Image: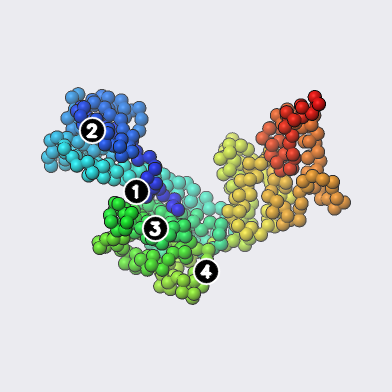
């Protein structure tokens, strides 16, 4: 559904986090251990500052609960020292001596919160959940921003055709603005890739990017996901939840397949675009946000407007700037570049066929590449990527032959790979080569009593390559035990 994992929306079965409790009071440690453990947190405890430091050095934590008064060191000193080493892990001070001055000093020294003994368990658990969720969200956003810069900057969008050059010029022009952009095009053309490039090259690049597949959620859940809800808004609303618009404030939300959004949600989305405000479900409080909206569709939204399935006013609000992704069949000059790009991507993932610089050494034969160039690519770039990934997995040498291509592509080119039986007078060169290879493998397997390991050694090819050829050539492999029994019968 989304490129971002939002902690307060993920499954309750997910790991809630690990907490370190540093307190010299046995009762406090035992109480917090029981309370947090019952709620599903992993808990470690330490009775001294020295023991606490040892725990912190041995593993990572999602939260530290630190007593202000320790026997071997003050909690405030320990707080400052922890912050010198780690500025990110949430830390909350706990003490029996509550005062405004101590709280202010603790917060200035890097504490995220401050609790006085005795505390309210429900409030304590709520704040712990909030701090852990906030930290995870920050960590995941940092990872997202790093991925965006690495993967979605303009140099990594592959294409040198005139249409792609013009398209990327347009992306460069619109990225710095806050205008709404509608990306249109067939399935598999890379609409989300363009949306991420717009975000990564905008002033919002350091903020959240959340992608929403509008068609994957029922209307009521989509509204709650987008706008959040307050406790009691509906039967299962046991606690308040932030929605994507609040989470993505000052960032970007991308609506994939925006044409599938229902009428009621369309009206609320229109209000957010026009007024930059919304109300969570069940709330009377208006929230103001600054969120840039990008949308994509493979449908004809104008036709949906004419059929009264999509609001006309929302259509024009979304279609301020339109970027139309060309299908791959209309920019075939980009296919060789895309093939090279995907070869390197999947060779790195599979750790095979790489040169010293980490680039792929795989190449299609001229015949195979011609088949790729002639194919109509109904699945567009995504289909081509799948074909290249398959080739990387099945390749046994650096030159990838025609017979590694999927059968639908071969059939489209008029090539029928032979799968056993006598060859007819109209057999192609590919049929003849495949038939020869099939008979050679069967002969060697029979000579080795159908031991694939021994046959691979005799043929001087990797066992994995032999297995791939057996599957591709539809060779029925006999069990060695059956061969041995028949020999002794």
In the picture of the structure, the residue carrying the numbered disc 3 is 221
Between the residue at mark 2 and the residue at mark 1, the CA separation in whole angstroms equals 25 Å
Residue displayed at 70% across by 57% down: 374
Between the residue at mark 2 and the residue at mark 4, the CA separation in whole angstroms equals 60 Å
In the picture of the structure, the residue carrying the numbered disc 1 is 8
Q: Disc 3, disc 4: CB below 8 Å?
A: no
Q: Disc 2, disc 4: CB below 8 Å?
A: no
Residue 210: name its quadrant: bottom left
Residue displayed at 59% across by 61% down: 327
User: Of the residues under marks 4 and 1, which one precedes in the sequence?
Assistant: 1
Between the residue at mark 3 and the residue at mark 4, the CA separation in whole angstroms equals 25 Å
Residue 176 visible? The answer is no
Residue displayed at 49% across by 48% down: 151
In the picture of the structure, the residue carrying the numbered disc 2 is 31
Between the residue at mark 3 and the residue at mark 2, the CA separation in whole angstroms equals 37 Å
* 457 w.r.t. 275: above or below: above
**Helix, strand, or loop for circle 1?**
helix
**Helix, strand, or loop for circle 4?**
loop
Foreground residue among 175 and 57: 57
User: Of the residues under marks 2 and 1, which one precedes in the sequence?
Assistant: 1
């Amino acid at each position: 559904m989304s490129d971002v994992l939002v902690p307060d929306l993920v499954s309750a079965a997910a790991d809630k986090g690990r907490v370190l409790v540093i307190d010299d009071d046995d009762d406090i440690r035992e109480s917090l251990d029981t309370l947090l453990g019952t709620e599903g947190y992993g808990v470690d405890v330490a009775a001294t500052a020295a023991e606490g430091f040892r725990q912190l050095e041995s593993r990572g934590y999602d939260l530290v609960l630190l007593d202000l008064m320790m026997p071997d060191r003050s909690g405030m000193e320990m707080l400052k020292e922890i912050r010198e080493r780690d500025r990110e892990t949430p830390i909350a001070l706990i003490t029996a001596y509550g005062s405004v001055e101590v709280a202010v000093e603790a917060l200035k020294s890097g504490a995220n919160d401050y609790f006085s003994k005795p505390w309210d368990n429900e409030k304590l658990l709520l704040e712990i959940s909030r701090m852990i969720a906030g930290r995870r969200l920050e960590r995941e956003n940092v990872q997202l921003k790093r991925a965006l810069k690495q993967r979605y900057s303009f140099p990594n969008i592959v294409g040198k055709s005139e249409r792609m050059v013009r398209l990327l010029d347009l992306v460069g022009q619109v990225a710095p603005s806050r205008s709404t952009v509608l990306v249109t095009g067939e399935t598999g053309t890379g609409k989300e890739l363009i949306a991420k490039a717009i975000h990564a090259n905008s002033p919002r690049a350091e903020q959240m990017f959340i992608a929403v597949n509008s068609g994957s959620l029922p209307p009521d859940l989509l509204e709650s996901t987008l706008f959040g809800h307050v406790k009691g808004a509906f039967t299962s609303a046991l606690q308040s939840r932030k929605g994507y618009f609040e989470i993505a404030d000052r960032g970007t939300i991308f609506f994939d397949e925006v044409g599938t959004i229902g009428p009621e949600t369309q009206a609320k989305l229109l209000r957010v675009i026009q007024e930059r405000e919304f109300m969570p479900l069940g709330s009377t409080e208006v929230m103001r946000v600054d969120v840039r909206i990008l949308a994509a569709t493979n449908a004809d939204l104008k036709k949906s407007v004419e059929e009264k399935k999509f609001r006309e006013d929302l259509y024009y609000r979304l279609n301020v700037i339109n970027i139309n992704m060309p299908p791959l069949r209309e920019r075939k000059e980009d296919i060789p570049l895309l093939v090279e790009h995907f070869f390197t991507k999947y060779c790195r993932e599979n750790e095979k066929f790489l040169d010293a610089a980490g680039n792929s050494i795989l190449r299609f034969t001229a015949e195979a590449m011609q088949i790729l160039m002639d194919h109509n690519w109904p699945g567009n770039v995504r289909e081509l990527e799948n074909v290249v990934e398959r080739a990387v997995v099945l390749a046994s040498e650096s030159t990838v032959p025609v017979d590694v291509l999927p059968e639908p592509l071969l059939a489209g080119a008029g090539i029928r790979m032979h799968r056993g039986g006598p060859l007819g007078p109209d057999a192609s060169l590919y049929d003849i080569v495949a038939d020869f290879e099939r008979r050679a493998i069967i002969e060697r397997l029979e000579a080795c009593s159908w031991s694939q390991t021994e046959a691979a050694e005799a043929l001087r090819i990797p066992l994995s390559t032999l297995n791939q050829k057996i599957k591709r050539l539809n060779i029925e492999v006999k069990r060695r035990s059956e061969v041995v029994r028949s020999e002794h019968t």
